Amino acid sequence: MMEKLKKIVPDTSVIIDGRISEIIKNNPEVEAAVSEIEFQANSGKEVGLEGLKELKNLHEKLKNKLKFAGEKPGREDIKFSHTGRIDEIIAKTAMDNDATLVTSDRIQANIAEVRGINVHYFKPKTSIKEPGIFKLFDDTTMSVHIKENTKILAKKGSVGNFNLVEISGVPAKQEIENYAKEIVAYTRATTDGFIEIQRKGATIIQLGLYRIVIARPPFSDGIEITAVRPLVKTQLSDYKLSQKLMNRLDERAEGIFVSGPPGAGKSTFACAIAEYYQKKGKIVKTMEQPRDLQVMDEITQYTLLEGSMENTSDVLLMVRPDYTVYDEVRKTQDFKIFADMRLSGVGMVGVTHASRAIDSIQRLIGRVELGIIPHIVDTVIFIRKGNIEKIYDLKMTVKVPHGMKEQDLARPVVEVRDFETGKAEYELYCYGEEIVVIPVEDEKTFAHAANFKTTDIAVRQSKGYITLKPKKFKKQFAKIFAGDRYITTAKLTEGGNIKLHRKSYEGDMIMDALRRGKSISLK
């Protein structure tokens, strides 16, 4: 219990956590340094908004007994508080007013004591009720969605099979505000919670198993809270991987992309790989924003260092892990950091969104040089509905690309092969100044798709397109040839046309063939 004092100056830590309401019961005069709270509230940060509400409550309770540091003449320096001077300003306020500084910040308390300032230190709250939003989850709930003026919804089911259901009526706006306040307070009080990202109108929190996003205007059109948690935790043995793939993971795979659509189970599988390597005696770290991978304590989870994942990678290179799991490889900078770490000798597992397995490889194009793609990613594991749907193996070779005939067209080609069968499915190579991704089709693929006989077709040219129009056939697949040279395979529209961009690889091939006097035909 805090003794009765004549005059106190609480800092932001005890205002934001609500402790100030307890303090004022025994202390008649309070001078609150509000600049930092004002700055955080103006920035749309949850802690600032909660602190502002607490100050309003104080003002109503204390009437004229509450003074605000910084409103006196000659204290213009308050406006610079957000540059890091707020602690100094608060301490100076206590000293100038012969008051006692009240704080739950141990560093602030120690510095005040050294400077001869009266100080009362409150230990941070360790006992606080669990957020009410947790009660909205059951064993089948993956996410809860709360927004003002709408009913509370939840995604329920199992991995790859979720349904959106109503779990409550339309909550009052104050009820949603209370949910947000409880979440922020509990995060600040527990060692298992982190405010990962704070922007104007958006706060992302990792609280135990839960990833929580609080959105407010102007970022969103109303206050909204979304809480997500993983439903299952798996081991690599749960996926029934072939011995061939297990050997690959053990002996060679050091540049792995785990890809798939949102909610497919990518992160769950990445966690299983991370723990598999950890149990094999490897040093494993993660790079995440936010940190929501559910991994064993032995695996350290890193996030942005001073706002930059590049800084994080610099530290990791000095830590020298055997493997690093990079969650959410999405932006150009993410791919470049992933590539740099892989080329530095670190085994990398990247988690990236893709609707098809080949799409995750295409996202590297233009971000790294073609020739080093197989050195960055040698294995692609595509996940859908919690199961492994496709595995690709990448290799660099020098050959004549599929569909070309002349030997002088040989060039470096990245082959993308089905890992289990070894069959080539795509080729990546340079054509002019572009890198093209061409599917490799065998003769049987279209044997039953279309029974075209070789037929001359009309070729129409416009500013941006080339349109191929045969006299018959609709909605069928066909191979396009220039003379006897295969160009590509395409599907005819309902109107019986094939439309190609003039500046595409296929468009260039057709234009070149026409200039050489070769006929264009379909088979």
Image (spheres, rainbow, N blue to C red):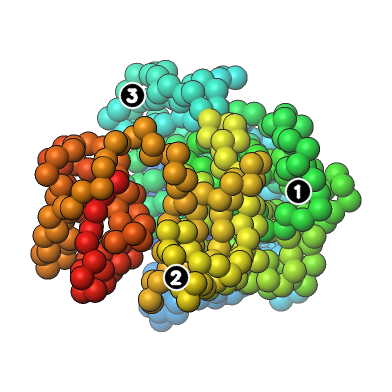
Q: Name which residue type carries label 2.
A: Glu
Q: Is residue 435 visible?
A: yes
Residue 477 locus on image (x, y percent)? 30, 41
Categorize mark 3 by other alpha carbons within 10 Å: few (<14), some (14-19), many (20+): some
The disc at residue 151 is 3
> Does the residue at mark 1 contact the one at mark 3 (Cβ under 8 Å)?
no
The disc, 1 or 3, on the residue closer to the chain's N-terminal end is 3
In the depicted structure, whether residue 215 falls above or below residue 141: below
State the residue position of label 1: 249
Label 3 residue SS: loop
| Depth order, front residue of 510/395 | 510
The disc at residue 137 is none
The disc, 2 or 1, on the residue closer to the chain's N-terminal end is 1
Rendered residue at 51%/42% (across/down): 260
Tag in front: 2 or 1: 2
Categorize mark 2 by other alpha carbons within 10 Å: few (<14), some (14-19), many (20+): few
Instruction: Estimate the spatial distance between the alpha carbons at disc 2 and disc 1, rounded to whole Å.
Output: 38 Å
| Depth order, front residue of 428/278 | 428
Q: Name which residue type carries label 1.
A: Leu
Label 2 residue SS: loop
Rendered residue at 75%/69% (across/down): 345
The disc, 3 or 2, on the residue closer to the chain's N-terminal end is 3
Tag in front: 1 or 3: 1
Instruction: Estimate the spatial distance between the alpha carbons at disc 1 and disc 3, rounded to whole Å.
Output: 46 Å
| Depth order, front residue of 288/98 | 288
Rendered residue at 38%/77% (across/down): 433
